[in-house]
Amino acid sequence: MDGSLSLVLLLLFLWCLCSRRMERFELTAPAAFVLLGLLLGEGAGVLDLGLPHATVKALAEITLVWVLFTDAARLSFRALRPELGLYVRLLGIGLPLCVGLGALLAAALLPGVSGWSALYVGAALAPTDAALGATMMVNPVVPARIRRVINVESGLNDGIATPLVVLALAGVSAAEHTAGPDATGHALVQLAAGAAYGAVLGLAAGWLLRTTLRNGWAAEDFAGAGVLALSLLGYTSALAIGGNGFVAAFVAGLAFGTTHGAPPRVLLYVEQSGALLSALVWLAFGAVLLPEVFAQITWQAVVYAVLSLTVIRMLPVALCLAGSGLDARTVGFIAWFGPRGLASIIFGLLAVEELTPAGARPVLPVIACTVLLSVLAHGLTSEPLANRYGRAAAAKTAGEPTAPIEELRVRGMAAGGLHRTPKPQQPTPPPRPDAPE
């Protein structure tokens, strides 16, 4: 085990050294670590990640907590206001349609999947992951407005889908008689308690941090570590009072982000810590989960994976954006870049822990197949489609004034880590009247 741990740490450091170089080959961190897991995992016998289930569950839960908290906390509602209508369409209409269509097709196509299991599949595969299209997200030829819309949708839809996943898992457990008949009602109470507690905690913590920073009591150098602890506190303390920790972490992040008043670098520590655990989850996905489910993948799972990345994602996006003023090319571009990634993997790992092997067996292969196909499809198409769409968008808006490109931060570990878009060039100041010719 010590040798495997050393190898994992070496891989992380080597990726740090060459991550920028790998951008030229369109290789993102998720794709790289999945590939390394497959090459060095159980098949090759080089990497032995024989971790106890409790360790795997803890890794998945902490990663999800940090992702949910930071995705919510780094959003500025003031910056969201210009495109608020698009976000409401995508998250308030498109996401429920995606979950519903995914559940219906899962019940119709996948053997042994119906009812709560179908809802779980639809909800677990609804969240998107912008990190899988990182090269597109930092490509300056794509209009900043479109990149921002895709990034914000990716940052919020996993938190919105989490209550549905929790409720569906409770329903499956009740159907398997591994939980009491009132499991779904108890889950609803936990979700409500977690949301209320997270809101109070986030508002209070944000106000305290803003006040102490303003009065010079808190040092910015340690604020990042404090926020990291806060995100985990929201999860653990919500569990202690009988609430849902994941919902508490997400709502606490939303509330904290609106009130903390701290510089953006305060959240950078939490983002980078989450990026580290995300890399480990991707590695475990390739080394452990994929080899286990390869033998269980059926043609129905492959067909559903293709439908999940196309019809189940693209049709709801097209419907919810109808009448939004976006042209068909832009709607298609947003609809295609809905990769499935980290959140879906973690939801799958939670299913392993919450359900019996018989209950998890029908749903895990389709989740693993969809994520793997998304890693390949969106990784390969990110750069060429971005360039093609960017050229078309530039030709359409030629001669129109352009707005400054604001900095975008892609969730998770992208090709070279956390990327920034190039800053717009400042206009050259006019010469002074007394300046020499």
Image (cartoon, helix red, strand yellow):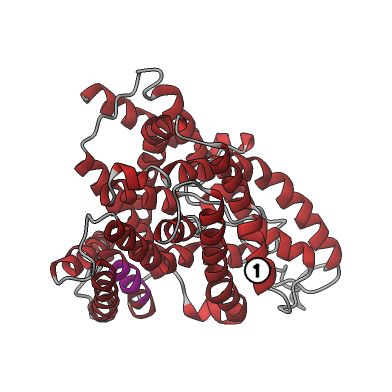
Residue 278 is a magenta residue: no
How far across and how far down the image is residue 68, in percent? 37, 62
Where, by quadrant of the figure, is residue 102 drawn?
bottom right
* Residue under the image location 55 percent in, 62 percent down: 151
Which amino acid does the dot numbered 1 rest on? Arg
Quadrant location, the C terminus: bottom right
As drawn, 312 above or below 317: above
Tell me where the magenta segment starts and ends, as one range.
247-254
Q: Nearer the viewer, residue 137 or 34?
A: 34
Residue of label 1: 145
Question: Is residue 112 in sight in this rendering?
Answer: yes
Question: Residue 425: where, in percent of width, then height?
Answer: 68, 63
Q: Which residue is painted at 34% across and 48% down in the image?
A: 359
Dominant SS type (magenta)? helix
* Element carrying mark 1: helix
x, y (%) of residue 184? 29, 69
Total labels: the figure holds: 1
- Residue, x 35% and y 40% (percent of image)? 280
The residue lying at 51 percent from left, 56 percent from top is: 107
- In this rendering, position of residue 232 left or right of residue 42: left
In the image, is 428 to the left or to the right of 279?
right
